[in-house]
Image (cartoon, coloured by chain):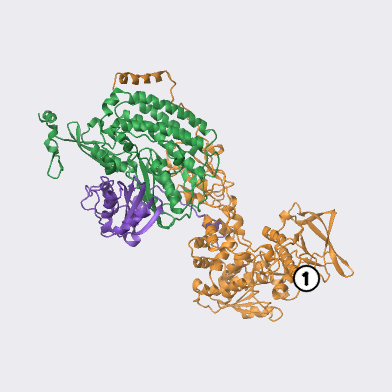
Amino acid sequence: MNTLIDRLAKLFSISDVVHQRPNLAFVTTPMENTIHLITHLRDRESFSLFVMLSCVDWIEDNQFQLTYVLNNPTEKIDVGIRCFINRDSATMESAHYLWKQVATYQRELKEMYGIDFPGSPRVDESFILEGWDNIPPMRRDFDTKKYSEETFFPRERPQSNDPAQYMKSKLYPDE
Amino acid sequence: MSFKDVLIPFKAWGNFFKEPVTLKNPMREAAPRYRGFHKNNVNECIGCGTCESICENEAIVMIPVDSVETKNGDSGLRPMVDYGRCCWCGLCVDVCTTNSLSLSNEYTWVAEDPEEMKYIPGVDKKPWDENEKGWKKPEGNFSYYPLERPHMQELHPEDRDHSFIEIVKGYSDEEALLEADRCVECGICTATCPAHMGIPEYIKAIRNKDVEEGLRIMYETNPLPEICGRICTHKCETVCSLGHRGEPISIRWLKRYIADQVPTSKYAEVLRQDSVEQNGKKVAIVGAGPAGLSAAYYLRQLGYSVTIFEKLIAAGGMMRYGIPEYRLPYDQIDKDVDYILAQGVDIKYNTEIGKDIAFEKLEQDFNAVYVATGLHSGRSTRVPGSDHAMVFQAIDLLRKITLGEPIEVAEKVVVIGGGNVAMDITRSMARLQKIKYGKVNVIATALESEDKMPADREEIVEAREENAVINPGWGPREIVVENNTVKGLKVVRCLSVFDETGRFNPSFDEADTNFFEADMVVESIGQGADLGFIPASYMEKLEKDPRGRIKVDPHTYQSSLEWLFMGGDIIEGPDVIHGVANGHKAAKGIDLLLNK
Amino acid sequence: MSFLNLKADRSKYPQRDADGKMQIDLDSHKFVKLWQGPNHPGVTGNMSVELTLAGDEIVEAKTHVGYLHRGFEKLIERRLFIQGMQTSIRMCVAEPDSNEYVYCTAIEELSNVEIPEMAKWIRTLILEMARLQSLVRVVPGQAGTFGLGLGVQWGVYMRELILDRFEELTGGRVYHMFMTPGGVRGLLPDGFKTRMEENLKEIESFAHRIDDLIFNNVVFKKRAVDTAVIDPSWIDNYGITGFVARSAGFNRDVRKSFPYLIYDQLDFEPKVMEYSDIYNRAKVRWFDILTTVDLIRQIMRKMPEKGDFKAQTPNVLHWTAPKGETYVRSESSRGEYGMYVVTDGTNKPRRVNLRGVSYTHAICVLEDLLVGVNIADVAAVMVSLQTCPPEIER
């Protein structure tokens, strides 16, 4: 694993290497390099299996983190490639041509986070949410509870009592 | 593919001759561990609401229950479970602080109205209340929070028995975080604390690594956190919900941790109290003990001009002149006291009311007077020989030790008394003997048997570690004096201290006697108030209760004389935290009087 | 009439333009659009396949999901670590224990909690029991899609037997919630192993009965053999894992390649086959039933009798994990089941993302595999991939 990271470091600009487990490392790379790095890993380093593409919303930094997890079935190691993209104009290069299932992930990210992947097949078709009329729901600023209370018919929950406050009202209300 | 493939599947006809496996009504009973409808042992439940905090579906709400009284250690609330939300995960059972909550293995209950599908387990009777089966908290030491405190670092007996250096070292950052993490934030403790301190809140501040916020929270209700963090009687810990299954949260040491972390120089900045609007009214406080200091602090917060009259040369009262230094170092008293005095409190030391200043003058010069002079006169056993010069009062000796005055230290000492003051003098004498003679020979004897001794358990244990002998269960009969020298104490076996009606009425077995050799006897069976400085003309006007004690309003501590407030140990306690609490209440009461 | 001619001309349709895109003109009457699902007995779970047919042959398929989206990943972001487990299990109904395992393990790894040995054995037992209850239902279910319902009924009964054991062990039948970050919530009850062994014997006999009923059945063979063949070149390209990869000659099993819990102490060899048609994809899972039965026996034999089953964790009400991220995988009965978890130093996860097996199998694989398949076999193809929509729309 270490030698792999060393080899990659010579060819690409990578940073924030975290060896999470002996067989799993995470690295950060600039978004311009990401797809090159992934292609390199697939074609030159036997990372033939695409495990998943995920997104984390770091709303406080105004960034989305995309994580591509690749697996090398021969060496039995995983690499997670992170890249950070701007949250306001969230667009990322598409990797749909590398593995078949990538398009599905990208389509979901478009719907759930509003990240565009130009050129990805059916990326604009709705995936899970037909007729969605709000901001992409997996973004941190989407408030699920508020949305459901406004959209559905919440059942009234009885008023609960905080033990300390209740005891004050019963035992020493005037103090 | 072959002809065999056509025939073989017909083997399935063999099932035609087998018993069907379908289940018939009535429904089968579920497994013993099944997670069905809730049960609650209402008598064990304390209504701490931890089940509500853990429930991810908000299926539990805490509801007042008529049959349960709200009292110390029991909120009087009980959980109500809403089966429109419950997912039967059983986390509420696993997290329950008292083990009162469990699930039955009953799973058949149908109601047409969804509002019917909620009830208060144990209170609303259900057919499965008596069902012993169902999910219970896993056995063994399974817990969703640690049940044991981090070990507190202390000086070893051999390092401490010849000095008055503080024994308890206090929590490190790491230990304090671990201990603060255990708190379930139920808040049951707050009601029991006489000062109603925001305990869960300041513990949360420790978890957030914000001790300054913790200090601010403490000062809202208690201006003596360094002191209370060391010697508080911690009534809160006796009701802590975690104490039902494990060790209660070490609330006292966490309080000390917060105060220890903030240096004196930062107090003013942290507490941000420099701009108080002055209202020009004047309050006199008699006695600079915990109650007087607490009242002074909160009166200053309200803008009153405060003058404290203190008989001795330093402030602190019993905290300084009663409690030995190894439990409460003087610099820690100074830290709290100096901050209070720095709020602009005027303090007159060496000033005794009735001698240096007339009590009448207080009435004339001030808008209100708060008397909190404490219990400083020791009670005598009045057994034969107790008037001998080598028989002392513990409280007098402790005061002299603090003042640095020389005291008698005999080679063989007997202490009469089983309370904390008796332990204080026993352990102080042990130290002084060790210094003077290189060995310890002090015996403490109490009326009560060991398990009923009023002293804190750790005091007894630590006294023994320091080679003092604790020999309880004896009633003093005579201090034997020969040739005008004390020879020892004659005692008889004490069978019980209180009679059936709970009154103090000890019974003895006269046949079982013992004799403790001693050159010196110290009496420590209690203290009384000395209110001799209040002239008789005032005393006559003060309303008293049937037992002859001065009556004050329980909320404002105002006596029957409108301008005179009384508090501290002379009214309730005796301990520091009651003093702090009633000093605070008196400050509010004075404000009510002068600001109406 | 034009539709009669269709059969003769089928090879011509659909025509493709220069860039390879299919030209499907519904007005030409040469194609029919059909929705199989979301409410259809031949569909696994609540999903639907939008089919374009030329005659009875599929020329294009599109998977549609979203009929049960409940935003679990989003919900977990608003829950304490201890509470997330109760939500995570609902992401896959058929085999919820894989969710429990990956979620708990990810949280433990990110908070540096080491679980006791006993907990590892019990977790493994639960995972294998979950695999078994899933397999005994879906393997005969393969024949069910061709109209042979008898095996399914047997299978449902076998599953109930395992659920009885789950009920006894965990207190729940479908959602077990027995793992918890830090370990498990109890030991095996008295007599559990004896009763389990009785069930295992019954399941073994059941396995042989369905071998006779299904795998040596001329009708089943006629329809399953050579239908919907997955080419070995697809495996990496489509991200195919689990039994589907193994039926195509790829020895891929997370239990072997990334041994977790105590799988390295167990003796087993997952079955690998050479040709992935519907028949072999069912058969490879039939072998999995036998392997799993053997594994459960091994676990019960080798596991310690007693021991701590939960590590002392921080107070669950204030449990915080330092900033970090990890990917944890396990082998479910369907294939690689993983979870990507990100923590940000607070008491709630920043992101929990499930990598469900069906995310690839039921979308890109299914869509391409259905092309050229007879409409009557669509359900069979779905079951042969063991698609599970809840893990697609978490």
Q: Is residue A157 visible?
A: no
Q: Is residue C164 left or right of residue B375?
A: left
Q: Is residue C358 visible?
A: yes
Local secondary structure at mark 1: loop
- Residue found at the far right of this picture: B483
Q: Position of residue C124 (x, y in %)?
A: 45, 40
Q: Colour in which chain A is shown?
A: purple
Q: Quadrant of the C terminus of chain A?
A: bottom right
Q: Is residue B584 above or below residue C331?
A: below
- The number of callouts visible is 1
Amino acid found under the numbered disc labelled 1: Val
- Residue found at the far left of this picture: C1
Q: Is residue C249 above or below residue B91?
A: above
Q: Is residue C88 above or below residue B268?
A: above
Q: Position of residue B129 (x, y in %)?
A: 55, 39
Q: Position of residue B588 (x, y in %)?
A: 56, 69
Q: Colour in which chain C is shown?
A: green
**Which residue is painted at 46% across and 36% down in the image?**
C166
Between B579 and B224, which is closer to the camera in this rendering?
A: B224
Which chain's colour is orange?
B
**Image mark 1: chain:** B
**Which residue is painted at 26% across and 25% down in the image?**
C222
Disc 1 designates what residue?
A: B409
